[in-house]
Image: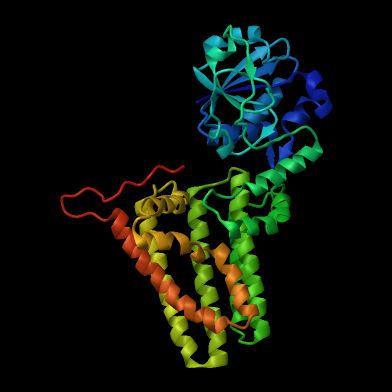
């Protein structure tokens, strides 16, 4: 897919601080020009026709093009003596041989996300407002039919025009830094840790370092849980809740700064598993101090069920996703269960599976602890963890199992 991006002339950019300041101003730790191109690349754009005014220094373009985030995008430069005005058909005429049949018009200062660009629908007429992204047909630019219409399909986003708009854009990115499959609890977690994420985005702290920080906090929480008193348990629950927020932050930073990786997904999953086992062990030890041997029985069942769930889900992830795209696992399993909603087990599992997510678990562990119901939590956890691995085995066979001489039972839908 092709995109067209026109850089304004120096006179237009002077109120923004000049070309260098305007184009390379950091938005959530990434220069604006790089962010616009990288977002388009995430949406499937593989080539960009960059219309660049001759009165702006080429060194700005060179510094932006050197960023690794946009190395996979082919940049085709068109230098112009005068600023490019997309409203004038004559200026498009000279570019016709270099345009694809359909292309994305990218405003130079529009901050959005991948889903916003993917939501664009093809427009057969020239848009009224060129300050917003649009998916255009090439023939509309030279058509004798001069009607200008407004698209009803403007993607969400923020136009960077001042320092205030930079702050608005960063808040927008925080709000939209989750996945489409995230629910109420993840959205709430993002609201709680949003200010810290905006601050961290302007530092050199990496998502993996944030993940490690969450692990440290969770281990300290497990030690507090093991103390056995109500105060210790409450301190442990609060610390575990904080570790859950930190766990949310690493993914938010990775998506906002385009730092997602297969290793990061694997590492986050490994740390989450260690966190579960450490905290469950701490809860078991603390309740054993208070209530005796019965806590060891249920705690042992909880930890055993958790280990088996980790093993079975890891096997299921390998079957459901490619090695370089493990982050698609949750979305693909949701799609499979939705497509299989006529099956009662799939229908029920689709509704309750969110409770095994760390971002949800931290809320309920804190609630049970505050209410003095930690023994009830241990009992429910022992049952739930074992139902989880049994259910995961069932769905592994149902969705990916083969019989001799038969193809796989169900195709995995493409990720949205």
Q: How many marks?
A: 0
- x 55%, y 80%: residue: 283
| Residue 356 as seen in the image, left or right of residue 313 | right
- x 58%, y 73%: residue: 365
> In the depicted view, which residue is nearer to us: 339 or 242?
339
Residue 356 versus residue 202 in the image, above or below:
below
Q: Quadrant of residue 68?
A: top right
Q: Quadrant of residue 393?
A: bottom left
Residue 148, percent across and down? 64, 16
Residue 407, percent across and down? 22, 48
Observer able to see residue 209: no
- x 81%, y 29%: residue: 16
Residue 173 versus residue 225 in the image, above or below:
above
Residue 195, percent across and down? 73, 54
Residue 147, percent across and down? 63, 13
Please identify the residue farthest to the bottom as the structure is shown: 292
- x 40%, y 73%: residue: 386
> In the depicted view, which residue is nearer to us: 265 or 194?
194
| Residue 85 as seen in the image, left or right of residue 377 | right
Q: Quadrant of residue 71?
A: top right
Residue 188 versus residue 260 in the image, above or below:
below
Observer able to see residue 180: yes
Colour scheme in use? rainbow
């Amino acid at each position: 897919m092709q995109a067209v991006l026109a850089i304004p002339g120096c006179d237009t950019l002077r109120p923004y601080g000049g070309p260098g300041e305007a184009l390379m101003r950091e938005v959530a730790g990434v220069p604006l020009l790089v962010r616009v191109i990288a977002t388009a690349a995430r949406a499937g754009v593989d080539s960009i026709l960059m219309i660049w005014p001759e009165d702006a220094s080429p060194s700005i373009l060179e510094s932006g093009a050197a960023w690794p985030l946009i190395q996979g995008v082919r940049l085709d430069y068109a230098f112009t003596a005068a600023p490019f005005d997309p409203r004038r058909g004559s200026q498009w005429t000279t570019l016709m041989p270099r345009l694809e049949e359909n292309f994305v018009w990218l405003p130079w200062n529009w901050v959005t996300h991948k889903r916003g660009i993917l939501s664009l629908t093809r427009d057969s007429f020239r848009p009224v407002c060129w300050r917003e992204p649009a998916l255009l047909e090439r023939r509309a630019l030279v058509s004798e039919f001069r009607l200008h219409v407004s698209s009803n399909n403007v993607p969400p986003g923020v136009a960077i025009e001042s320092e205030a708009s930079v702050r608005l854009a960063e808040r927008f990115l925080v709000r939209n830094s989750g996945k489409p499959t995230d629910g109420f609890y993840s959205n709430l977690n993002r609201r709680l840790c949003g200010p810290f994420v905006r601050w961290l985005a302007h530092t050199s702290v990496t998502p993996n370092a944030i993940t490690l920080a969450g692990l440290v906090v969770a281990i300290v929480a497990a030690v507090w849980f093991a103390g056995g008193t109500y105060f210790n348990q409450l301190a442990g629950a609060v610390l575990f809740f904080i570790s859950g927020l930190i766990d949310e932050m690493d993914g938010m930073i990775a998506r906002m700064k385009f730092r997602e990786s297969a290793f990061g997904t694997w590492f986050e999953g490994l740390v989450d598993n260690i966190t579960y086992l450490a905290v469950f062990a701490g809860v078991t030890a603390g309740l054993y101090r208070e209530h005796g041997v019965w806590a060891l029985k249920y705690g042992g069942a909880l930890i055993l069920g958790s280990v088996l769930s980790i093993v079975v889900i890891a096997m299921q992830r390998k079957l459901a996703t490619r090695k370089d795209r493990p982050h698609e696992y949750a979305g693909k399993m949701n799609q499979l269960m939705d497509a299989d909603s006529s099956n009662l087990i799939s229908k029920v599992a689709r509704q309750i599976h969110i409770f095994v997510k760390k971002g949800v678990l931290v809320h309920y562990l804190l609630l049970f602890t505050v209410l003095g119901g930690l023994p009830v939590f241990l009992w429910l956890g022992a049952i739930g963890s074992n139902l989880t691995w049994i259910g995961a085995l069932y769905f592994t066979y149902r969705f990916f199992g083969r019989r001799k001489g038969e193809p796989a039972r169900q195709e995995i839908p493409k990720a949205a």
